[in-house]
Every structure is written in C-alpha cells, then in structure tokens.
Image (tube, helix red, strand yellow):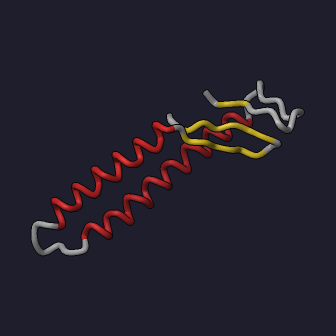
Amino acid sequence: MTVRVWINAGQALRQGTWLTAVLWIVSLGVHLGYDYLVDGQGPPAGLGTASLTRYFAVTYTIQRLILQAKAQRIANSPRQDFSDSGARTPSW
C-alpha cells in the first residue's frame, strides 16, 4: 500500500507517498477518459457526473475501511509502545 499509518499519542495518523498521488491522478484520468468515451456517444448525457460521484464514494469508502483495519492492527500490536507520546511507529 502507498499510505503509511502510525500511532502518535494514541491517535492513528496516515500519510500518503508520492506514489499515492500519482496513482490517484492516473485513476482519475482513466475514469474521466472512460466517461468521455461513454458520455460522448449519445443519449446518456450526464452519466459522467453521476459515475464520478459514485467513483469517489466507493474509492473513499474502501480506502477508509482498509486504513481503519490497518490502524486497528497497529494499535493492537504487542510491539506498539504508547509510553512515548512522540514516537512514530510506522506500519511498513
């Protein structure tokens, strides 16, 4: 995964890498290109906007579920030390 998750002062934090940004841009470009091909071919006008909204909803939901599970796994890890509130324990 291209997102790092760690625990800091009992709070789960996350940070994407440059690869995360590249993959988001590429996937959005592919989706918009597909919408242009489908929406530009006749009667289903406005389909691109509706599918883009669904695309974001599904993508963010899946990303949230995966990151929550990862943060929970890190929080339950026996190697996690909460005594140092500034300690960064990365997930990779």
Farthest residue to the left: give it: 42
Report whether 37 appears left or right of 84: left
Picture layout, residue 59 above or below residue 86: below
Residue at image position (60%, 42%) is 15
Residue 37, image quadrant: bottom left
- Seen in the picture, residue 34 relative to 85 is either above or below; the reply is below
- Relative to 85, say whether 40 is above or below: below
Q: Residue at x 89, y 33 (%)?
A: 83
In the orientation shown, which residue stands out farthest toward the top?
A: 79
The residue lying toward the viewer, choosing from 73 and 52, is 52
Mark count: 0
The residue positioned farthest toward the right in the image shown: 83
Image location of residue 72, percent across then percent down: 68, 40
Percent coordinates x, y for residue 87 in the rendering: 80, 33
Q: Residue at x 44, y 61 (%)?
A: 57
In the rendered image, the quadrant that contains the C terminus is top right
Q: Is residue 34 left or right of residue 87?
A: left
Q: Which quadrant would residue 91 be assigned to in this image? A: top right
Whole-percent x, y for residue 60 in the image? 49, 55
Q: Is residue 33 left or right of residue 19?
A: left
Where is residue 47, by image quadrant?
Answer: bottom left
* 22 up-or-down from 50: above or below: above
Can you give x and y, in whole percent of width and height, for residue 90 in the image?
Answer: 67, 31
- Seen at 16% across and 62% down, the residue is 38
